Amino acid sequence: MIDELRAVLGDAAVLTGAEIPRKNCSDWSKLPDIEPLALVRPATTEEVAHVLRLCNRYGQAVTPQGGLTGLVGGARPSPSTLALSLERLTGVEQVDARTATLTARAGTTLETVQRAADDAGLLFALDIGSRGSCTLGGNLATNAGGNRVLRYGMARDLTLGLEVVLADGTILSSMNTMVKNNTGLDLKQLFIGTEGTLGVITRAVVRLHSKPAGMLNAFCRCADFSAVLALLASAQTQLADTVSSFEVMWPSFYDLVITRLPQLRRPLASGPGLYCLLEATAADLAADGARFEAFLSQSLERGMLTDAVIAQSQREAGEFWAIRGAGSEYPRILGEINSFDISFRRDDIGRVVNRLESELAARWPGIHALTYGHVGDGNIHLIVNLPGVTTQPKEEISDLVYGVVREFQGSISGEHGIGTRKLNYLSNSRSAEELAFMRRVKRAVDPGNLLNPGKVLPAPETGE
Ligand SMILES: Cc1cc2nc3c(=O)[nH]c(=O)nc-3n(C[C@H](O)[C@H](O)[C@H](O)COP(=O)(O)OP(=O)(O)OC[C@H]3O[C@@H](n4cnc5c(N)ncnc54)[C@H](O)[C@@H]3O)c2cc1C
């Protein structure tokens, strides 16, 4: 099979053994490396189809790989799989300003897509911290979220059409560019968020939005979580759909990162309460800026917030966001961490965080449990680290956290996906009937279980 692949793709596109770069053996989950059987790097959709046709013939399983920034082990090869990297299938094919759509190949980085939209005077609204390395195909396969979901939705909401190669090598072109199209099954949704288990995404048509004249940012403090919810509701009424982000940082997060990372500038002194980063888009900087400021003073008078500072420049806004984005520094300041990406009904979040932080502290005194996240979307991130312990009790910590998720009927994954990391906890968020139906879909679309085996869906219960 390797010889046949080389004959069609060329030697440089099929690597084995020591030729395989280490980066293709795992992803940002930092799970231990697994060397794939081979690494193939097709440069066209037809080449992807050729690889999958051959794999289908030989019964060879495949792990699709994008930018390898996933946090749950989805792109990490399973033992004996072929890694299929989309890194050579790159390029923005078209930006159509009249229909506000962009067509790109799956291996194009998110940053390149954003830049192409920007050059055409438009906005591709998906934005995540890994933008320089993650790919459009990976973003769609994981249904990525990020900082502006509140205003523009997740990757799913920004996608109009897809081209996908199925497990048997069939090219399924569904490159719809229309906003309205009710013609039976919305096929693209089968592949968005299913982490490469149903097909390999090769091209996509995404929606663009008009580019705001600027962004308005305020770093605020609220007395408690009910004040946070009141501030958010009021912002969404008064500033309407200009509110693009509403991020909340609990003191467990703010106090630690602001003291441990001297490069961060402290916008507000540490004190009682929670910290919020409110961002709104401006069509007219002067008029919308005045409205934003008036909204904040009124919120202060009404007691929804106790302090606030408005960014006076892009640099200052960047400093606010650097605090919220301090996550990439965790390994340096904390060592090994256990990270959670969980979501809930917005109004449950205050109680959930109190429960999680207090139960973790009671079970492991001195534990770090840093909480922050996209509260506007009901999604929080929790970083747990037991200081001075070389082997973190990962499983016990996960059991505790996902137990609380189950109790509050939340989701074990807000935006990062399941991969292999959360496989054993999927039933905390999905019913037995839902899991059985997902397996039926998988069997129907990929009967040989060749696409990303061992990811997303746990092995069936005996008898199912
Ligand atoms: C610093 C940092 C910040 C991050 N911030 C966010 C955030 O705010 N929000 C968020 O949602 N995520 C975030 N992430 C996680 C990650 O960047 C996203 O999950 C991203 O969408 C993954 O894209 P990728 O190209 O790196 O995919 P990979 O990691 O390569 O793959 C992810 C999954 O998609 C599959 N896949 C990849 N390409 C394809 C394809 N073409 N067809 C089919 N399946 C494919 C893989 O098999 C795997 O299951 C962050 C990660 C880092 C490191």
Image (cartoon, helix red, strand yellow):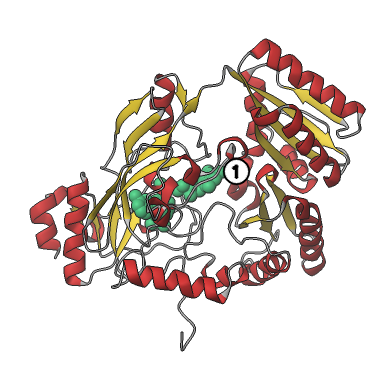
Does residue 23 appear in the picture of this structure?
Answer: no
- What amino acid type should be assigned to the residue bearing mark 1? Glu
Query: Looking at this view, is 320 or 30 the one in front?
Result: 320
Q: Quadrant of residue 60?
A: bottom left
Reply above or below: 212 against 176.
above
Question: In the orientation shown, which residue stands out farthest toward the left?
Answer: 7
Where, by quadrant of the figure, is residue 391 drawn? bottom right
Coordinates of residue 157 in the picture (x, y in percent): 50, 43
**Residue at numbered disc 1:** 329
- Let me know if residue 229 appears in the view: yes
Q: Can you give x and y, in whole percent of width and height, for residue 156 in the image?
A: 48, 46
Q: Is residue 237 left or right of residue 171?
A: right
Residue 432 located left or right of residue 275: left
| SS for dot 1 | helix
Q: Is residue 57 above or below residue 271?
A: below
Q: Residue at x 77, y 38 (%)?
A: 233
Q: Nearer the viewer, residue 319 or 92?
A: 92
Q: Is residue 55 left or right of residue 268?
A: left
